[in-house]
Amino acid sequence: MMSLDGSGPTGASATTTDSARDACLVEVASSSDEWSRVCDLVSRESQPHLKHYGFSLEIAKLHLVSPGCLQRQQQQRAKALGAPTLLFHGTWSDNVQGILREGFALPQRSGMFGPGIYFADCPLKSVQFAKKVGPGRTWLHSLQRQWHRAVGWLSRPPEQRQTLTMLACEVFLGRSWTLRHAKAVNPSEDLRCGWLMKALGAGDYSSVYVPGGLFGAVRVPEYVVYEPYQAIPKYVIEFTVKHIQAS
């Protein structure tokens, strides 16, 4: 078992105390059934969108998140929302430790569907968010810049490519409001509007689902939650990207 600071295996006493308080990362062997299951999931969810993105993912290293006190508290609170869905979230590698220690932080700027935490069922979509986003950028500018970087990264020889990071998280969606076009929403604010939001189709919701499509806001589906306890990391995936040659 690795400690979050990467200092190596913890001793017996540290395992019984520190790991009960803080989440720990357990490296998954590439020969294990769990490795195969995650690889199969990544491949299966990527397959319908390979042509759209033009690249596939290859897992380089996989860690299972052993829950700490925070994650157990989040699970207890979130279970009222029903069973979780395993979804992907691209992030800068340096953010992982903070997310495991403190949970997800809500963004200061609103995205296409409000100030929430965004996920995808297709891991390829999360690649564009697996690099650091500079401060003072709008979500659209940041998205465009990350996409251009990803395309440029694909043209590099394999030995020059960085290993990127994404999280596979248990996301407690609860009741989802389906939106096909960009709309700044916030469940805690919307529910104060009572009958008006219900008339607009919101009702009592705890997440937003955006189906993918040619004429909607996104080509590949997105999921958004608005409370940090609704998203609990299960795996930390380190990966490289493999460009698909046009036939």
Image (cartoon, rainbow, N blue to C red):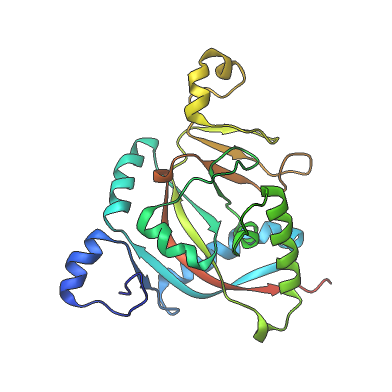
User: With respect to residue 65, does 141 lie above or below?
Assistant: above
Q: Nearer the viewer, residue 236 or 220?
A: 236
Is residue 3 left or right of 62 when viewed as pictured? Answer: left
Q: Where on the picture, by quarter, is residue 97?
A: bottom left
Furthest toward the front, the residue is 136
Q: Residue furthest top?
A: 195
Where residue 1 appears, as percent x and y from the top left, is: 30, 74
Residue at coordinates 44% horizontally, 51% vertically from top-left?
Answer: 104
Q: Position of residue 94 (x, y in %)?
A: 49, 67
83 or 229: nearer the viewer: 229
- Quick one: 60 or 99, which is closer to the camera? 99
Vertical arrangement, residue 76 with respect to residue 30, above or below: above
The image shows a total of numbered marks equal to 0
Q: Is residue 124 above or below residue 158?
A: above
Which residue is pictured at 56% across the width and 37% down the height?
Answer: 208
Q: Quadrant of the C terminus?
A: bottom right
Q: How far across and how far down the image is residue 138, in percent?
A: 68, 48
Which residue lies at the image location 62% right of the left edge and 33% below the top edge? 184
Which residue sits furthest left? Answer: 13
Q: 52 left or right of 134?
A: right
Q: Residue 175's x, y, as percent?
A: 48, 32
The residue positioned 61% from the left and 77% from the top of the image is: 162
Which residue occupies the extreme bottom position in the image? Answer: 159
Q: Is residue 77 above or below residue 233?
A: above
Q: Horizontally, is 226 left or right of 178 in the view?
A: left
